[in-house]
Amino acid sequence: MRECGISVKHRRIGMVSVWLALAVTASEGSFCVEGAEAIQAESQTEKEANLKGQAQGGLFNRWTFDQQKSGEAPRGFSMLGFGEGPAADWTIKADTGAPSASNILVGNSSCQAVTCYRLIVADGFQYEYPDISVRMRFPVDAAAGVGGVVFGVKDATHFYAAVVDLATKTLEVSRVVDGKETRLGRSSITPKSVPWHTLRIQRNTIISKDFIETFFDGQLVVTVEDQSLAIGQVGLLIRGQTVLDFDSLHAIPLFSQRPLSAPAAY
């Protein structure tokens, strides 16, 4: 695994947001640039066309897993695997204490290798610049719970991953291209004292640069610059030997390059 992680103070300019919102904030976090590895996968014209295509009501999705019966496999999702080892088991489970009662999704992998990724991706939805959030609950000992979200998924060997390891209190963002994994950024986290944690990913763009911003329990943790992968599917992942609970998966598009209002008449 190739790693890049530079901690610098920078000004973060979020150019795209939900339904034409503009945010400009200053923050400090982990910033990683891999110019040699960040291959421009699409032209500016293609990017603009894809951005316009994101303005579709059908891309605003929330999966609570409450419409199915306990013990069933989640409908509308496909399972993918990266790395050697057995397939994971993804099962709907009744849980009245869930953030959105009454069901949760449980991911269970017996794979021993830490490079063993097991994905579940939503069928039929392609996002260029997604805003993804999910609620996660780790095992009590947190020793066997490593997982998060995936986006920009082309197939089992092309995707981005944001992975939380609560045992080591770290969050990392990785990219897999042609089966080659590169760690783009990694940072420590301070989990809140709650059973259910929140992981959120935003892929933004400004001019010719693409940024991936990662939030854990409401705090910006890792920011990386990368444009190797473009439009793709979104979903969840578990890594290594893991049992992890998920609920309330949200995915919406960040798509606008237009200003908030028309230019002044003078």
Image (spheres, grey):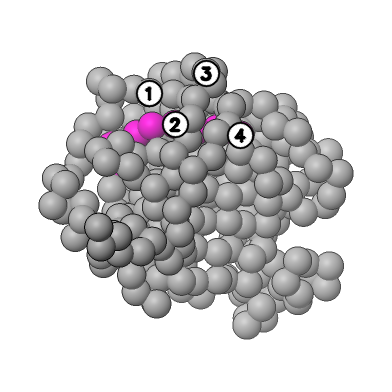
Q: Is residue 67 left or right of residue 78?
A: right
According to the image, label 1 marks what residue?
33
According to the image, label 2 marks what residue?
224
At x 75%, y 66%, the residue is 99
- Mark 2 belongs to which amino acid? Val
Where residue 192 appears, as percent x and y from the top left, is 81, 42
- Mark 1 belongs to which amino acid? Val
Disc 2 to disc 1, how far (Cα)?
6 Å
Closest to the observer, 37 or 256: 256
What span is colored magenta in the figure?
Answer: 221-229
Dot 4: within a 10 Å radius of its alpha carbon, few (fewer than 14), some, or many (20 or more) residues?
many
Disc 4 to disc 2, how far (Cα)?
10 Å
Closest to the observer, 226 or 18: 18
Mark 1 or 4, nearer chain start: 1
Mark 2 or 1, nearer chain start: 1
At x 16%, y 53%, the residue is 46
Are the residues tagged 2 and 1 within 8 Å (C-beta)?
yes
Counting labels gives 4
Q: Is residue 79 left or right of residue 53?
A: right
Are the residues tagged 4 and 2 within 8 Å (C-beta)?
no
Mark 1 or 3, nearer chain start: 3
